Image (cartoon, helix red, strand yellow):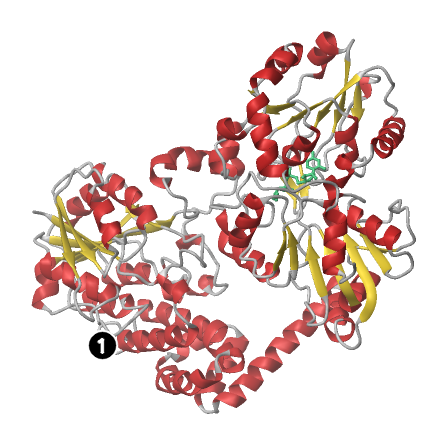
Amino acid sequence: MKLSIIIPYSHELTYIRDCFTSLNEQTVRDFEVVFVSDHAATDDLAMIKQEPVEFPIRFIELTGERTGVAAARNEGIKNSKGEFIMFLDCDDFIEKTAVEEFLEAADDRDLVYARRRRTPYGRDGYYADRERILAEQAAMNTTEETDPDEQDSEGEESLFTEYDVNDPDDWIGVFTKIIVIDPAMTAISALGIIYRRSYLIENDILFDESYRCFPDLPFVTRAMCETDRVRRLTTFLYMKRKHSDPVKMPSLAQRTDDAVKHVEIMRAYRTAKEKDKLSGTYAALRLDGKFIRYYVTRISPFFLRGEKSDIPEVYSETQKTLGLISDEAKKKSKRYSRRIVNYSMNHPAEKIAKKVRMHSRRQTLVRIMKSRSQTKRFFYRKFYATGKIKEKTVMFESFFGRNYSDSPKYIFEYLSKTYPGQFKCVWVRADNKKLRLPYPSKQVKRFSFRYFYYLGKSKYFVFNVRPPKYFIKRDDSIFLETWHGTPLKKLGTDMDAVFMAGGTDIVAYKKNFTDNSKKWDYLIAQNAFSSETFRRCFEFGGTMLETGYPRNDIMHAEPSVMEEKIRETKSALGIPDGKKIILYAPTWRDDEWYGTGQYKFTLKLDLDKLRETLGDEYVVVLRTHYLIVDALELDRYTGFAFNGATFDDISLLYLISDILITDYSSVFFDYANLKRPMLFFCYDLDKYRDVLRGFYFDLEELLPGPLVFTTEEIIDTIRNLPSVMEEYKEKATGFYERFNGWEDGSASKKVVEEVFGLS
Ligand code: C2G
């Protein structure tokens, strides 16, 4: 047996298939797997044992108190039979040629290292779909698979380029690569390496089981320091999975609290520095550089913001550690880094904290002086979001102020009409264009000084999207998040990946989301499915208003009210009487953007064909999503195609239309209230579902109307509408009951009464 692959396992079942598939597909099969269960659930193990594997696998278990990745790997080493050993984390996988390439390079070596990559995100089934997803990502230009060696992400990397590490057998070169492969100090790893088993055993090189998070640095240092027979491969053979969900599926480092991490990192660093063989080498210099950065960005701020009771221990570790940093590394560091390291060596923790505070204040000040928006935020933090709150002031925002619409509009109208003069209403608008409001109210431009003033002073907030990240939720304020749709597309922490402009880091995206939702007191759910999903995917802990959407009240209004609205809307859009109306309202595409909040749109509907075939009987209203900035060019279709993109309120477009064509937009959950025909034009279904978002439902099962992929199919369906309606009758009824059962025209009333304490 040439190679034993040791896989420690505790709980990450989702990713096992990728891991095993990558082993099934190896081009050289001379390996075994030693699968070490670290107190895994019996059900998990039963499922894992049923996975189809085409390699010898032995299951062993850690028993008693022994736990953790270090113990599991040690147990694996003890139980393996291969000439070489490789560690493979159960959520990672290796390239098809990994075993072949490693073994070919091994020869008489004790250690062979190859490069690691990170998966772009933690999607289940990623390995199987890898080629396709990578191709899609390359096309989208959002791939994160750059070579970390070539990144200058530490800002200091470029200072360390004088050493040539090109010889694959050069010991320092190999060690340097192990140290720098990932920009983070915490990522120095024993993975992506094979070790000669007899060499480890004879030299008693094992993992130190007292480490909970970072046993790898001491291990690789020892494994490197007892031999000269090492080699480096330049190919990427090991795929490390980036965990996309720090909340539900955290990686080891995401799971443990800061103090433990800091203490371990310092211990590990010291252990590595003790090695004579490393001392004074270029690899040691790189390690020092990494540690300096870790100290400056993570440990020193801990003295200011960390858990008080943990500070003495962390401080005492720093005093044992900082002296080991070489002068050369300090010299090559940035000025502040050098200063804070030196200062920390002979000052108490409180003083270090003070220095860190001063530095961070100075940086804030520089930021404020440099940018007007920072100045406004500074005013917001310091002056507006403090002092007396304005008890009767309500701030409204719909779709970032881009229009007067959605549930905030209907809540505002109900409040203003039923309780005239009792509240001061302030509407946020996106630009200088005034919103047309039917009741007295103030308007503030988003991100103006006035906006920040009301963001700080208002008692009530009625928003249908998230408030800004830096929004300060005051204890005595009340935040009502109306949200803006029953989700079909995966949302918040349920998402696997983010392709949105300015948000490719899913971990940060999810954290921003859940930090934001902690500031919401109330959230509206359109139906039981939304209620349950929002609780989970927003991690919402406040009061769920299970009322249905205020924006849909209008669809249950008195016929005379509806008729009046229909007349007004048609006349505003210039639509003649006597024609039936098709509303086309698609959603946005996450990956097609110009910048944050500014998305592209390509019309896939063939308007010429539609006009030719249906023009006698129908007109079309085109309504792009509020995030779309591309203007519709409809000059050629005067009298047939009408531009509904800039019309404020889509609910009124629902009212005037006879048929809805949409795609993955939540609009159909609202339109269903009208019990009119719906078509789903999903020309990019595979990509949208499998790459961009992922859905909560199986579309074919869920949709109360036909899925269509071409304009011809749309025309055909519309021509045969009565029979299509008949075909979907039962489904439509079930859909309505499931998603619209709560909606009877009284949502605004219920919401206002509860949130404003009125009745
Ligand atoms: N909308 C609109 N015009 C469109 C599409 C949507 O006015 N052409 C409005 C509708 O009120 C819709 C809301 O924007 O309900 C949300 O649009 P979605 O297409 O569903 O997309 P998104 O903004 O991503 O919200 O939980 C719902 C999700 O968050 C989806």
Quadrant containing ligand 1 reads top right
Q: Secondary structure at mark 1?
A: loop
Q: Is residue 294 left or right of residue 516?
A: left
Q: Is residue 83 above or below residue 678?
A: below
Could you tell me which residue is drawn at 15 percent across and 41 percent down?
55
Residue, disc 1: 276
Q: Is residue 578 above or below residue 70?
A: above
Residue 381: percent from left, percent from top: 72, 71
Residue 589: percent from left, percent from top: 60, 36
- Which residue is at the front of the view, 371 or 708? 708
Could you tell me which residue is drawn at 41 percent across and 50 percent down?
147
Residue 325: percent from left, percent from top: 38, 79
Residue 703: percent from left, percent from top: 55, 28
Tell me if I can see residue 664 in this picture.
no
Tell me if I can see residue 672 in this picture.
yes
Name the kind of residue labelled 1 in the image. Asp
